[in-house]
Amino acid sequence: MTMPGDLHQQLVRLGASWIRRQGFGVVATEISVTGCREQPDVIAFRQQCSVIIEAKASRTDFLADSRKPERNHERTGLGVYRFYICPPNVIAIADLPAGWGLLHVDGKKVTEVVRPSGNAWPAFGRALPQFPAWGPFQHQPNLEAERAVLFSIARRLSTSAPAIRRQLHGIDEAA
């Protein structure tokens, strides 16, 4: 039987792997940064945009997440694009906040339930006219917070601490 913490870690690992396959070269998991209220389970960057993935092992966790000010538009958050990753039946499509994608995990398989088509990932405000499906999935990111996250990633990568490198690359020694 999978414990909730184990399931969460599996979702994070699979989310990090999925976003790497989408062409995101900078990926960090469960990173906490001074000056940034959010602590995304997965954050990833390409040249033109950013993505966060929130792993939800239970419906209770999802409902608690929905009360965060970054989720209900009281303040801007991390990520031009935002996704939840969870087992099937944890989050219904109708429960998704506007513009969020949904990934389901069954074993080690990630199924894209809700997301724009293709692999364009255009910069914020640049989805139209050539990528009309991407516009509804874009969120105005908190650029100051994203800069703090990128600085933290760069600073951590400049150290030789293997544990930090594993965290930034989403590598689990037990896997």
Image: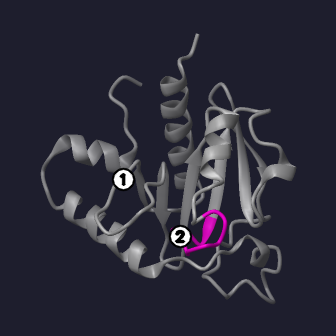
Circle 1 sits on which residue? Answer: 31
Please name the predominant secondary structure of the magenta segment in the image: loop
Residue 25 appears at what percent x and percent y?
44, 62
Inspect the image, locate mark 2, and give the three-letter code of the amino acid beneath it: Gly
Left or right relative to 28: residue 159: left
Distance Cα–Cα, label 2 vs label 1: 15 Å
Badge 1 marks a residue whose secondary structure is: loop
Of marks 2 and 1, the one in the foreground? 2
Indicate whether 85 appears above or below 71: above
Image point (66%, 36%), residue name: 60
x 49%, y 71%: residue: 46
Coordinates of residue 27 in the picture (x, y in percent):
43, 56
Q: Who is closer to the viewer here, 40 or 159?
A: 40
Q: Which residues are magenta?
A: 71-81
Q: Please tell me which residue is depicted at 81% across the width and 50% down the height of the picture.
A: 95
Residue located beneath label 2 in the image: 77
Neighbor class of circle 2 (other Cα within 10 Å; few <14, some 14-19, many 20+) is many
Q: How many numbered marks are there?
A: 2
Asked whether residue 40 is drawn in magenta, I would say no
How far from the left and from the top, in percent, is residue 64?
Answer: 61, 45
Task: Name the residue located 73 percent from the left edge and 83 percent from the top edge.
Answer: 127
SS label for mark 2: loop
Name the quadrant containing residue 85.
top right
Quadrant containing the C terminus in the rendered view: top left
- Which numbered circle lies on residue 130? none
Above/below status of 115 relative to 161: below
Looking at the rendered structure, the kind of residue marked 1 is Ile
